[in-house]
Image (spheres, rainbow, N blue to C red):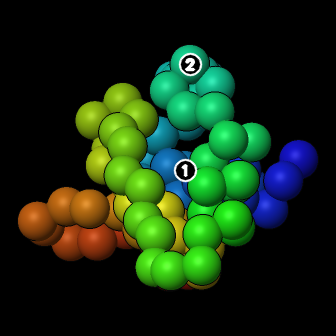
Amino acid sequence: MSDLLVDIIETLEACGLDRDEYQLYDTVDVEALEQILHSSSGDVEVQFTVEGIRLAVTPESVDVLIDEEPCSADQ
């Protein structure tokens, strides 16, 4: 399992979403996402939504995009 995939799953779990509640591969191609993030020479951010949770992924982090209290795997 890739580090990016683990980071995405941990972030979703920190927001209260159980692994049984979604199929990540139905939402995003993690291998393609890694290629995009690591092949760019400039700043790149990819945003997508999993079961209502908006994520912003960069080469350095996986962040939740919400207007209220943020949740992250780092808390």
| Secondary structure under the numbered disc 1 in the rendered image | helix
Determine the residue located farthest toward the right in the rendered image: 1
Would you identify the image quadrant in which residue 45 lies? bottom left
Residue 73 in sight here: no
Residue 60 in the image: above or below residue 19: below
Query: Closest to the observer: 30 or 67?
Result: 30
Name the residue tied to disc 2.
Answer: 26
* Front label number (1 vs 2): 2
Residue 51 location (% of width, % of height): 36, 30
Q: Is residue 59 left or right of residue 17?
A: right
Amino acid under disc 2: Asp
Name the residue tied to disc 1.
Answer: 13
Query: Closest to the observer: 13 or 2?
Result: 2
Query: Closest to the observer: 55 or 9?
Result: 55
Residue 49 location (% of width, % of height): 35, 39
Residue 29 location (% of width, % of height): 63, 33
Residue at point 50% right, 80% down?
42
